[in-house]
Image (cartoon, rainbow, N blue to C red):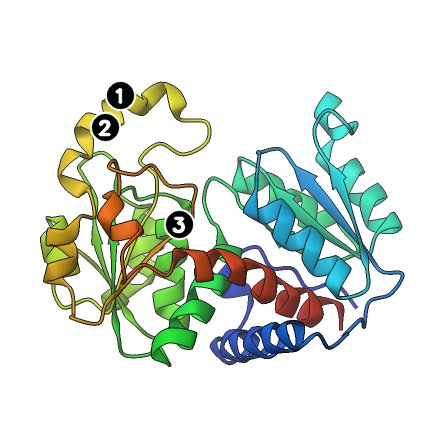
Amino acid sequence: MSSRHFLTLLDLTPDELNRLVLRAIELKALNRAGDLYEPFKHRVLAMVFEKSSTRTRMSFEVGMAQLGGHAIFLSPRDTQLGRGEPIEDSARVLSRMSDIIMIRTFEHEKIERFAEYSSVPVINALTDLYHPCQLLADMQTYFEHRGDIRGRTVAWIGDGNNMCHSYINAARQFGFTLNIACPDGYLPDADILAAAGEQAVMLDSAQAAARGADLVVTDVWASMGQEEEQERRVRAFADYQVDSQVMQAAAVDALFMHCLPAHRDEEVSADVIDGAQSVVWDEAENRLHAQKALLELLLS
């Protein structure tokens, strides 16, 4: 039987995703109660990082430890993959020595090739095209604060990047409407957008996207690997900051999320990210619990 991978949200059914969110909430409660739940003793997670990380490394490593297993951190400096070994060869070897593999890299095609040759499940912990693990945490966080997100409206404001693409897929899978506002030249991938049909709508301003929204989300204007574009992007995104005026256009009980790290007073004003509507710290913590639920699903 071939292994099941999690490269995008579309790799699970809507029902599986909803059950995963509920399971993450259960695992969080178990952890807070101090109850030991260690189903994966002697199981190993290989963590392949080609991009730096704080939340991703901590959440997967701590999560595997809490489940009774072990995680091994592998950077390009530590592996032959970083010295040019073919992806196919690395996949074959790592999957013979570990039970599950997590990869954080640049090109999405690289993780697809790795998964093709891996004999164990592969998890996308971020590529330039998608960031599905973050969406699991975001959906858990929304459910904890406001209940089911189905039928709600979410505003994505900023770059049409990997987070935007994953929110487009989430709109399809979780049944909400996504309003998207991006400056010209920084729009989401046309094919990913088109596949969502009426679930994802492009609007012409941050205010328009936020109008009546139940959740407002943004991300940094320059992602990893785009630092040399910072000044040009600051100019292009000047009208796309999530500030108090944008939040006032949203529903009165709207939440604010950001996958972090954040640049205060660039993509989000300090009063919003540090304000009462912000749930970014719950969102960050929930990476741990959502990914434990994902590990459990793929390893069970």
Verify CB contact (< 8 Å) between mark 2 and mark 3. no
Q: CA distance from mark 1 to mark 3?
A: 21 Å
Q: Secondary structure at mark 3?
A: helix
Q: CA distance from mark 2 to mark 1?
A: 5 Å
Say which amino acid is labelled 2: Val
173 sits to left or right of 211: right
Q: Residue at x 57, y 34 (%)?
A: 51
Label 2: how many Cα within 10 Å (few below 14, some 14–19, many 20+):
some
Q: How far across and down, in percent of the image, does residue 268 sit?
A: 26, 44
- Looking at the image, which is closer to me, 142 or 178? 142
- Looking at the image, which is closer to me, 37 or 170? 37
Q: Can you identify the residue that label 3 sits on?
A: 163
Q: How far across and down, in percent of the image, does residue 81 sit?
A: 74, 30
Q: Quadrant of the C terminus?
A: bottom right
Q: Can you identify the residue that label 1 sits on?
A: 231
Q: Which mark is residue 170?
A: none
Label 3: how many Cα within 10 Å (few below 14, some 14–19, many 20+):
many
Verify CB contact (< 8 Å) between mark 2 and mark 1. yes
135 sits to left or right of 256: right
Label 1: how many Cα within 10 Å (few below 14, some 14–19, many 20+):
few
Q: Can you identify the residue that label 2 sits on?
A: 234
Q: Residue at x 31, y 35 (%)?
A: 221
Say which amino acid is labelled 3: Met
Q: Residue at x 78, y 37 (%)?
A: 90
Frontmost of labels 2 and 3 is: 2
Q: Secondary structure at mark 1?
A: helix
